[in-house]
Image: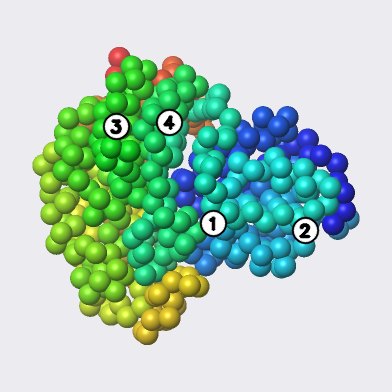
Amino acid sequence: MRHTPPPRTYRVKSFGCQMNVYDGERMAELLAEQGISPAPEGEEADLVVLNTCHIREKAAEKVYSDIGRLRREDGTAPLIAVAGCVAQAEGEEIMARAPSVSMVVGPQAYHRLPAMIADAVEGRRVVDTDMPAETKFDMLPARRKVGPSAFLTVQEGCDKFCTYCVVPYTRGAEVSRPFNDLVTEAHRLVEAGAREITLLGQNVNAWRDESNRGLEKLIEVLAAIPELARIRYTTSHPNDMTEGLIEAHRDVEKLMPFLHLPVQAGNDRVLKAMNRSHTVDSYLRILDRVRAARPDIALSGDFIVGFPGESDAEFEDTLKLVEQVGYAQCFSFKYSPRPGTPAATMDGQVPAAVMDERLQRLQGALNASQLAFNRHSVGTRCSVLVERQGKYPGQWLGKSPWLQSVHFTADAAIGDLVEVELVEAGANSLSGRLVQ
Ligand code: 5AD
Ligand code: SF4
């Protein structure tokens, strides 16, 4: 490797889940603190961080084509750091396969980026996929300026070991951040401009503090911050949906009526093979309790089609479940065998064409469900948190309490909480009219 001048500009590109978006923002803040500035729109950066996702095959393969695309016409490239879950899983392999990469840094070690950059500038390539004892959160700079809707990572990792999933390997065991740190960071976020905080975790509802209090306690304390208007949390596992958290949906007004609770499949044999440790029925009973606590709650989930051995009839059960629940919005994926996971070597891998067809049918059902949910909201008055400007002059975009995208035209500004009547519904957004 050659010596390079210290980078003056950076760009962070994040892929995958919201946790990665959060990590990407924190890396950007860290670089800014080092005196490196964001590269202006349309200009090449001296340092590019690819913050990668390993959850499905396509996401992982994308890294190599992205690295290739960073090459300049004269054969040189910017300083490249690969971060995120692909970095964690394939650190050495990336170094071998992509000579233009000079840094590989895992999700638990990115606070060490400044030292890695110093090495890279001197021509040394570095891989750091440690899960160090010191937590990155203590080493990162305080957050100064955030948008109206901000993320706060409260929990990382997963102990559930669903048989298809790499997360327990790439993100490690479940770890909860300490209560006081979170309350302090939430106050900082509010001072920096946040009006809504989404508590993040791979199993966010498994968060526990040092004296074993659950997420509802944290929600209750954050709800007492006067300038904070809204609280959300994602993503949850059915087995950690405690009575206390369900009651918070009834008792805490600032907790938004939205629950992302992945179920993955609608058939008990498939759920067992996935090691989900809940059944269709136990999942539905949780939803009943949540609905009893908060009747207007919007429900969301994740689905996988074509898990090894899934028969046509078993897939039909997933469609039945979708029909029965009436989801507000969902994510759905084709099963992707991940190296090192138990499902990757199971019998009965489903042919690609069958998966395509199942995904199409499922997405048709989910879109219909989402449209029905949105249509049902027409006529309701609700608050909208304004997040950005729309396409047209005077138009603004924001989110309803049920996480629907709402656009409206009025005198407003980013960060405003406005009262809107929902007047027209599409599958992906609604239009609203400002209530005076
Ligand atoms: N193949 C397809 N989808 C997957 N997910 C996780 N692992 C896989 C995989 N191997 C999906 C699950 C999970 C979401 C984040 O990604 O639905 O809830
Ligand atoms: Fe993956 Fe299952 Fe853990 Fe979710 S609960 S992160 S799907 S292992």
Residue 157 lies, with reference to residue 162, above or below; the image says above
Residue 300 coordinates in the image, percent (x, y): 29, 50
First in sequence, mark 2 or 1: give its number: 1
Residue that carries the numbered disc 4 in the rendered image: 181
First in sequence, mark 1 or 3: give its number: 1
Residue 337 lies, with reference to residue 31, above or below; the image says below
User: For the residues carrying marks 3 and 2, which lies nearer the camera in this image?
Assistant: 3
Residue 138 coordinates in the image, percent (x, y): 53, 34
Q: What element carries label 3?
A: helix
Residue that carries the numbered disc 2 in the rendered image: 100
What is the spatial separation of the Cα atoms under label 3 and label 4, in whole angstroms?
14 Å
Residue labelled 2 has its Cβ within 8 Å of some atom of ligand 1: no
Colour setup of the view: rainbow
Q: What element carries label 1?
A: helix
Q: Which quarter is ligand 2 in?
A: bottom left
Residue at horizontal 39 percent and vertical 51 percent from the top: 174
